[in-house]
Amino acid sequence: MKELADTIAAIATAPGEGAIAVVRVSGPASLEIADRVFRGHAPLPSRRPGGTFLHGHVLHEGQVADEVLLLIYRAPRSYTREDSIEIQGHGGSAAAQRILRAVLDAGARPAAPGEFTQRAFLNGRIDLLQAEAVLDLIRARSDRAAAAALDQMEGTLSRVFGSLYDRLVQVAAEMEATLDFSEEELPPTVLQDVVSRLQGVEKDAAGILATWGEGHILREGALVVIGGKPNVGKSTLLNGLLGIDRAIVNQTPGTTRDTIEEQMVIDGYPVRIVDTAGLRDTRCEVEGEGIRRARQYMHKADILIYMLDASQEIDEDDLAAMKAKNEKNTIIVINKTDLPYGESIQSYMTKQTAISCSLLHEEGIIAVRARIADLLRSQSACTHHSVISERHRKILVMAIKEITEALIVMRSEDAEVSLAASHIRAALEHLGEANGRIYHDELLQTIFSRFCIGK
Ligand SMILES: Nc1nc2c(ncn2[C@@H]2O[C@H](COP(=O)(O)OP(=O)(O)OP(=O)(O)O)[C@@H](O)[C@H]2O)c(=O)[nH]1
Ligand SMILES: [Mg+2]
């Protein structure tokens, strides 16, 4: 285990009022620091075994800072694998700050964001994928997102990447071994075997890449955008889905001018739902900007809800907007079915799998919600129960590129094995960054700086 020389401390609970606040300390001097700041029954904390908790007081400059519980962890049985203590004091920021000051004056230094988890990684308790999952869990906004993060914390994704890496190492070893022989000495099956194993790794890497969609939805939330002409009932739908009177609804076309974004959970999936300005030609600069943003959001959407007014005719603009996105990501909602139908709508309704609504009478919301849930499920229907993030996606794309290059070389007339092997080494370097077998300061900095202090 790598010994990190200093001892770090931070408040681990969220700021603001709460029942208790926890100050966490980790590093070789943790128990000495406990001896200095804690007053309770003898013997001193440093004479106690791990797993003990003690009741007493934290003293600072001769004064009682707070009445606390002190928890003792002995290396390697702690979050960081180092000696650690946790001091549970009263909630609210003042009491916790007093405890933190006492601990810092007794020899600890303030922890950087994510430094406790970074130590857990550097000390080999978890790999980088598991460390990232800690942050995913903290940030999870729905049950499904939390379940996926927990899975990753338990090592599901680590095993997936680990197996890819190990298989590639084996292939690389085989390739290196062939370099010692001349072409005539090598049975042809050896190189064929290398090619087919490389193909296997390439295929599986692509399979993992396909989980990005679900990972993106679970981490960032699916972007569901409501678009359409002015006055069709977009804001009414937003309010209906949220169950609150969020956006202004009015009979005047052009009521919504800016995008309105809210968060909600549908069938366990976190969703960012966006109401937009109605699409039309306008001379008004402000409305024009709103419409430009509306189009941008519609373009970015994971799911587009395109709304039509049953009493109006469908025109070219509607058709173009509905076709702009993949059918699988588009829900067409025909609202105001309580009014007499326009001619073109009538034929459209019989042809298309649109959802008919009369939102004014609160009809159709359940069907729209159910369709969103269907699409979310279908967009995330992958066999792996591990889902990758943007960082993992980039790594896989680069690794696959190298493997593909290696395959091209291997399949060519005079297969130059040493060149193919160098591509495989490059692929391994990329893959090694996924779980942190290979890491550098900059990589750790980008990952752990996103954490909160105290985690
Ligand atoms: N008859 C009828 N009117 C409806 C229905 N749904 C909404 N409306 C009315 O249609 C008008 C426009 O509704 P909004 O939700 O503001 O429409 P919008 O698409 O957001 O309009 P903009 O913000 O201008 O783009 C309001 O007066 C609503 O009460 C419906 O099902 N039937
Ligand atoms: Mg509106």
Image (tube, rainbow, N blue to C red):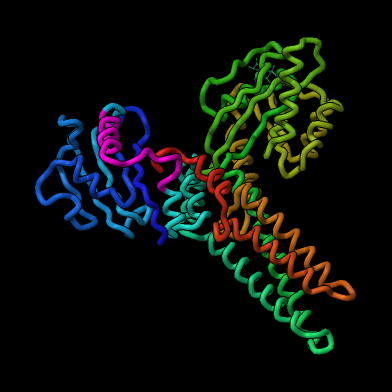
- Number of numbered tags placed on the structure image: 0
Where's residue 21, x and y in %? 29, 36
* Left or right of 170, for residue 116: left
Where's residue 132, x and y in %? 51, 49
Image quadrant holding the N terminus, namely bottom left
Where's residue 440, x and y in %? 57, 52
- Tell which of 12 and 25 is nearer to you: 25
Residue 377 showing in the rendered view: no
Residue drawn where x is 80% and y is 39% of the image: 351
Residue 297 showing in the rendered view: yes
Give the magenta range.
Answer: 95-116
Quarter of the image where ligand 2 sits: top right
* Left or right of 273, for residue 61: left
The residue positioned farthest toward the right in the image shown: 413
Is 106 a magenta residue?
yes
- Tell which of 312 and 152 is nearer to you: 152
Where's residue 7, x and y in %? 34, 46
The quarter of the displayed image where residue 114 is located: top left
The residue positioned farthest toward the left in the image shown: 42
Is 322 a magenta residue?
no
Image quadrant holding the C terminus, namely top left
Residue drawn where x is 84% and y is 26% of the image: 317
Residue drawn where x is 32% and y is 43% of the image: 24
In this rendering, is residue 445 above or below 193? Answer: above
